[in-house]
Image (cartoon, rainbow, N blue to C red):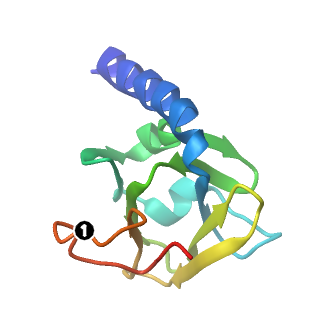
Amino acid sequence: MVMRRTLVGLAVLMWASAASAAGLEAVLRCGPAGQPADLLACLGDGSVEISRDGEKTVAAGAAVLALGQHDDQGLHVEGPKNFSIQARNQSAEHPLVLEVRRVDGTVIFEQTARRFATVAFYRCGPVLNFECREYNYEDQ
């Protein structure tokens, strides 16, 4: 089980490096900017779901940290043209924050969730895709 999680984590990290050319980064953090708490404190026993070009990955517990690069500002996950991320806050003390940026650092989306609320971002590429059910971002 641990070996499988490690292999999944390594595969996701290699894929994320290749996806960086798409120019999108999602940052998931627990707590307000400048005062982040441990991300796992917000997630509790919940999970993070990421979809990249139709490939869905769901991770819970410490395995969440293998979905991207984790530092004191949160979990950084790079995404391609077709990308989504979703997580639910389990913490009564800290907000769960999802911020999405372009490569140049421009914030294009930010959402905060209190206890039992969900943060989610869906991006379905630069053209209309009828298979994608939810949109909250358009290329300009």
**Would residue 93 be seen by someone viewing this image from the given angle?**
no
The x, y position of residue 100, in whole percent, is 59, 67
Q: Residue at x 36, y 26 (%)?
A: 8
Q: In the displayed image of the protein, which residue is found farthest to the left?
A: 131
Q: Position of residue 47 (x, y in %)?
A: 34, 55
Q: State the SS at label 1.
A: loop
Front one among 94 and 11: 11
Q: Residue at x 39, y 65 (%)?
A: 87
User: In the rendered image, which quarter contains the N terminus?
Assistant: top left
State the residue at coordinates (39%, 82%): 117
Q: Position of residue 66 (x, y in %)?
A: 49, 35
Residue 112 screen position, x and y as percent: 55, 82
The residue singled out by tag 1 in the image is 129
In the displayed structure, does residue 96 sit left or right of residue 15?
right
- Comparing 117 with 26, the one in front is 26
Where is the C terminus found, in terms of image quarters?
bottom right
Q: Residue furthest top?
A: 3
Question: Is 127 drawn above or below residue 113 in the view shown?
Answer: above
Q: Residues within 10 Å of mark 1 (few under 14, many from 20)?
A: few
* In the image, residue 55 above or below residue 14: below
Residue 2 shows in this picture: yes
Residue drawn 28% across the image and 78% down it? 134
Left or right? Give the position of 87 relative to 102.
left
**84 left or right of 98 in image:** left
Instruction: Tell me the quarter of the picture where residue 41 sits.
Output: bottom right
Give the total of numbered labels: 1
Task: Check disc 1 and give the amino acid type.
Answer: Asn
Q: Quadrant of residue 115?
A: bottom left
Position above or below: 119 against 1? below
